[in-house]
Amino acid sequence: MLFNSYQFLIFFPIVVLIYWAIPLRFRYIWLLAASYYFYMCWNAKYALLLLFSTAVTYASGIIINKIKSLEIEEGKRTRYMKLCVAFSFVINIGVLAWFKYFNFIFENVQKVFAHIGIALSSPAFDIVLPVGISFYIFQALSYTVDVYRGDIYAEKNFLKYALFVSFFPQLVAGPIERSKNLLKQVAEPHRFDYEKCREGFLLMLWGFFLKLVIADRAAIIVNTVYNDYGSYPGMYLVVATVLFAFQIYCDFAGYSTIAMGAAKIMGFELMENFDCPYFAKSVSEFWRRWHISLSSWFRDYLYIPLGGNRKGTARKYLNMMIVFLTSGMWHGAQWSFIVWGGINGLYQIIGERLMPVRNKLNKLLRLKRESFGHKLFKVVTTFVLIDFAWIFFRANRFTDAFGIIKSMFSVRNWWVLFDDSLFTLGLDWKNFVLLILAIVILLVSDIFKYKGIKVRKVIMRQELWFRWSLYIAVIAGILVFGIWGPGYDASAFIYFQF
């Protein structure tokens, strides 16, 4: 069930009305049932996989808690708990690897053996990737580690823990919540709060605007060019690549914002997943602002356990590369994703190594780091670097990425920016102008947010007539200008595939 589908527009109000109508002690059970129904709308049998991951991590938490109470020497207690954590990770990562990486690994093994004259036959079974598997497995694994570290209690109520893993607003595409935040909220009683409902509604409207008006409109041009890049060389690819940066931002941030809004209406607070990433002044800052729940997950559960920056510079850089290559692999079983992760890791290492040189240049040229021009230069430079890496993320195949890059730098057809050529890519001039205007609205909104001004809070302080006039105008705008697809074929969110 997609957020931007008519099924969800029926499902969500029903869930909310019943949730607030029934007694407090039954609400978590109702949300758990709704969450499993929500997930089963894609593939009912894969709800068993979700249940299995939930059961393994739940049992691991209970066992770790039991081990902590044993009267044995500290060394043995720690060793037993580590074994329990390892068991949980091996089982869950094994499930993830089977469904997500088996074909990728087997295809590459086939190629290696083919080089030495050995042909391996393909397996007879076909593996379908369960939607959202990377998200809910990572969320469940973080609980196991948190219990081991003593950051969270071991939840004894299986149904409450199952709701933490399967909470439907963020189940299939995040944000990847922590037990310290969401599990504690599951255990708390929630009272109806009109202000939270209003704020949640505004968040959902903004999320739908990002998805339907910007992301799905930009996708038309991006898909046209990238799926036939040989026919659209040079500046066509530059334009499509820039638009893809906004497509993936609005698509994923749109989902996260709708999830935050839906959860808030029911009294839950989900973590912020995006914080004006394209205003970052360095690649490292970008990754503190982009997909925050995943970036912080890798920091807390991979980078720091590997040693972080505590074991020397060389080890620090190795740890950074491991994190970013793993992040690339998490996004998809393709070499292009791994290379994308590697590029972002190299950006940070090179940027850090060049810091002394940049400091000397700034001093030599007497540049004012706090000036608007200097900040703008760093923002634009960071965007160009990130957008270049997005080529590998979006390309249909690893080899396509190199063909696209070669075309972008070798074909000089600047005139397509000034004639009507761009209007042959799937959007007429009216829709193209509308897309640009919508992106401007996004950037203005992010400027306010970057400066600490929450537009939705400002709106909520206005008079009743103004608020409702704005609500109606925004809803009408989304309905009229949203990209709904032929026959109302709702477009899936990009991150569902991960």
Image: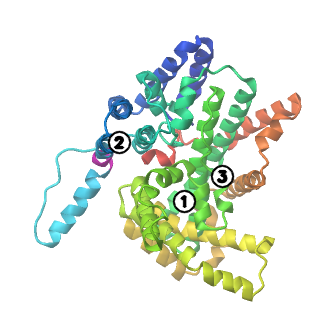
Of 397 and 85, which appears nearest the observer? 85
Q: Residue at x 58, y 64 (%)?
A: 284
Q: Nearer the viewer, mark 2 or mark 1?
A: 2
Q: CA distance from mark 1 to mark 3?
A: 24 Å
- Please report the bounds of the magenta region as a residue range: 96-100
Q: Which residue is mark 3?
A: 275
Q: Position of residue 193 (x, y in %)?
A: 72, 23
Q: Kindly indicate the quadrant of the structure image that contains residue 76.
A: top left
Extreme left residue here? 118
The local crowd at label 2, few if under 14, some if 14 to 19, many if 20 or more residues have their Cα within 10 Å, is: few
> Could you tell me if residue 232 is visible in this image?
yes
Is 95 on the left or on the right of 481, as rendered? Answer: left
Q: Which mark is residue 222?
A: 1
Is 66 on the left or on the right of 481, as rendered? Answer: left
Q: Which mark is residue 74?
A: 2
Q: Position of residue 90 (x, y in %)?
A: 29, 45
